[in-house]
């Protein structure tokens, strides 16, 4: 099973972006597969942004992931 997680692009340097996964988690990912700019939301899988998504979809996906994590901790 594969999982792609939404993140917001905060900085772009060529084909590398710094993205924010929320809660202070920043990572560098490759933009080689997508055309993303600062402020865009992307789905990240294995260090690559694989799709640009809209903010509403990103927020809903993050909400669902947080809910899953909350239930798994109980």
Image (cartoon, rainbow, N blue to C red):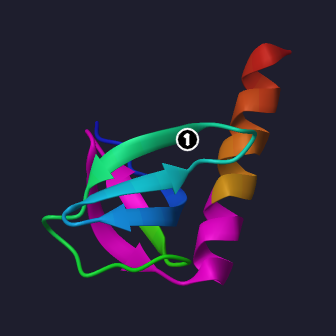
- Label 1 sits on a secondary structure element that is strand
Taking the spot 39% from the left edge, 50% from the top edge, the residue there is 4
x%, y% of residue 17?
Answer: 36, 58
The residue nearer to you, when weighing 5 against 17, is: 17
The residue nearer to you, when weighing 63 against 47, is: 47
Q: Indicate whether residue 40 is drawn in magenta.
A: no
Query: Which residue reaches farthest top?
Result: 74
The residue nearer to you, when weighing 24 against 5, is: 24
> Where, quadrant-wise, is the N terminus in this rendering?
top left
x%, y% of residue 51?
Answer: 31, 72
Range of residues picked out in magenta: 43-61
The residue nearer to you, when weighing 53 against 10, is: 10
Q: Indicate whether residue 44 is drawn in magenta.
A: yes
Query: Which residue reaches farthest left?
Result: 32
Taking the spot 86% from the left edge, 15% from the top edge, the residue there is 74
**Disc 1 marks which residue?**
26
x%, y% of residue 10?
Answer: 54, 63
Taking the spot 63% from the left edge, 80% from the top edge, the residue there is 55
Dividing the picture into quadrants, the one containing residue 68 is top right
Judged left or right of residue 32, residue 5 is right
């Amino acid at each position: 099973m594969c999982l792609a997680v939404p993140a917001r692009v905060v900085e772009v340097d060529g084909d590398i972006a710094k993205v924010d996964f929320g809660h202070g988690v920043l990572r560098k990912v490759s933009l080689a597969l997508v055309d993303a700019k600062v402020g865009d939301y992307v789905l990240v899988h294995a260090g690559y942004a694989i799709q640009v998504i809209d903010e509403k979809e990103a927020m809903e996906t993050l909400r669902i992931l947080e809910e899953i994590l909350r239930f798994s901790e109980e």
